[in-house]
Image: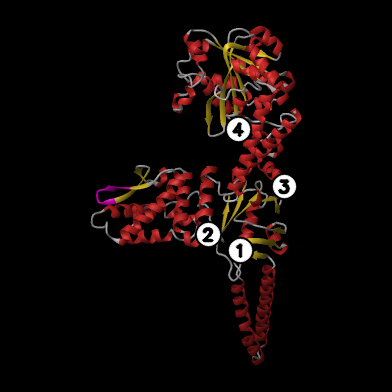
Amino acid sequence: MIKQIYLAPELATKRGLTEGLLERLGKVVILAGPNGSGKSRYLKLIQSISQYNTKDTAKRIARQQSKLPYLNSELGLTKNEARQLEIQNDISESESIIQELKQEIELYKRTIFSSSHTDTPPSAVVLDYPAANSLAINARDMSPTRLKESVGSTTTPGLQSAFSGMHTYCTHVAQSMYHAKHPLMTESNKAIQNQQDADTFNQIVQSLLGGKLGFTLEETEVLPTFRGRPLVIHELSTGERLLLAWAISLHRQQQALSNAIVFIDEPESHLHHDACIRALSKLRDEVLGPDGQIWLATHSVPLLAWGGLDAVHFVKDGSIKFAGNTVTSVVESLLGGKDGKDRLSTFLSDADEIAFMEFAVQCILPAGVADAKTGDKQQVQFTEVLNQRLASNQHVRILDYSAGKGRFASALRERFASTTGNEALRERLNYFAYNDPRFIEPDEKDACKARVAALEQPGSIEEYYWESMAQLQATHRHEIDIIVLCNVLHEIEPDDWIRTFRDIDELLAPDGVLVVMEDLLPPVGELPNKRGYLLLDEFGPGLLFDAPKSVKVLQKRENRLLAAAIPKALLSRVTPETRSSALEHLMSFSRERVEQIRAEVSNSPSHRLGREHAHYAMLYTNASIALTSLR
């Protein structure tokens, strides 16, 4: 493993690059930058440095030096002037070569400052993808001897050998599986070994391609199958062929790849990022060994995330440096500037919100409306209010409290459009949205009104979109059946909890219910108010409303998406004392989680645990600040 490397100007300028020093290098090193930035040239430069062998150069020097005594002796003996001139030129050439090689050794000595390989250079393996016109040899066109040779060639390091021998090796695996089941071969040690080898290879194929190799008989010929069909290489997609080559390389070239320095230029080419990452993870975790190392040149943001911040080096305009705290600039350069990064952030944020709203709608709608394919029985365990009112052909009124952009309305519309048998329900369900004008931007307001209008409810949009709580209460006092707080409660300051629940109490029908939905592990942090966000778990609402057994948890999915139902009768029970009880519980639980995560992370650190640790530490701090300020 190369731990530190200096790219000397004498080597870099030949490739149109500038010198650079890469330090504290780990198991994965990523050279990231836009097209034409020089990352592939740097990768080839580092490859050439890693393959440089001082001993080989010393042998070349010795060969040149061994010529000099003979040439000097011949020079003293010959009387022919033309021959003398020729010998003098040969001597000068040898001396020049010796001098250049000695300078080369000195140059490379100061290039790799630190490597876990001290005596001999590490083996370097280049995993280049085959050319677009490369063909896999068809095993059916081969004699047994040629088939055996082709299978053997797949151990040669590189994806090209794995690709060209793809069909022959898969045929060999199929034959091994067939022979292992043959009555005359079941006790053979070789057959057992070949079957074990085939099983190991199939595990890799399953993990990368989601299928396994098998075999079939065509008369007396054993042929490979994949996913239950005859394996015909040209019928596979480009990505499938490359993944199969990856599988063969990882399996057949383990000896060559073990403790090697592996160079890959744009591994994401022709591959889905998830598949590419699975292949790279197998290489890193199961094949490379303790001293192996992966060097990647890429402009893939998912690969940057896979490698981690410590692995990323930024290449721009022929220069290279550790990305570090400038990783934002790296990402922007790959996404079309700051606007591109902002568009992606917005897209991902919107995707998270859409997914949460889909969850929210599934919790609200009764049996026959929620997606029957989920198989989640808890989806139909909503309060009796909705079902009773629907059964009696009454209108059901739902208020989306602090509706924001109206994502819930959009999810409701999508659910109606994608599920049959909803016409009657749609006619008897009214959706209302409320936004506090202090916290809504004009574009958010417009988006919300557009989504409410898309529900095509009778009447004007002003009947369904509200920004005045007083006017909403005057119009629909004690009429709303369900009020939904989707990712809202954690944003409300505890000082306003009692007032907020009284406002909701004024709106709810006598048998109405408040549904609180929260993502207990939000994807991004936020500071919605001066005291920070406060996320109550499934036990928090019971303490807040002083009725632990009366607050019904409708769902808790993936240990993070929570939906809880609070009957109207409980809303007036919130007091300063119950509020403190809920906050104290939040503090205690958050402290417990921080301690548990710290114990867990000491054994198995991960990005996920780091995020959770920061999240619960922030919850503990926010709850502590809130309690102190309320006392």
Q: Is residue 340 above or below residue 475?
A: below
Discs 1, 4 touching: Cβ within 8 Å: no
Q: Residue at x 49, y 12 (%)?
A: 388
Dot 4: element: loop
Residue at image mark 3: 325
Distance from Cα at disc 4 to Cα at disc 2: 38 Å
Amino acid type, label 1? Ser
Work out whether mark 3 precedes mark 2 in sequence or the reverse, and give the earlier one.
2
Dot 3: element: helix
Whether residue 42 is visible, yes or no, is yes
Q: Which label sits in the foreground, 2 or 1? A: 2
Residue at image mark 2: 289
Q: Residue at x 48, y 25 (%)?
A: 378
Work out whether mark 4 precedes mark 2 in sequence or the reverse, and give the earlier one.
2
Crowd rating for badge 2 (residues with CA inside 10 Å; few <14, some 14–19, many 20+):
some
Crowd rating for badge 3 (residues with CA inside 10 Å; few <14, some 14–19, many 20+):
few
Q: Which label sits in the foreground, 3 or 1? A: 3
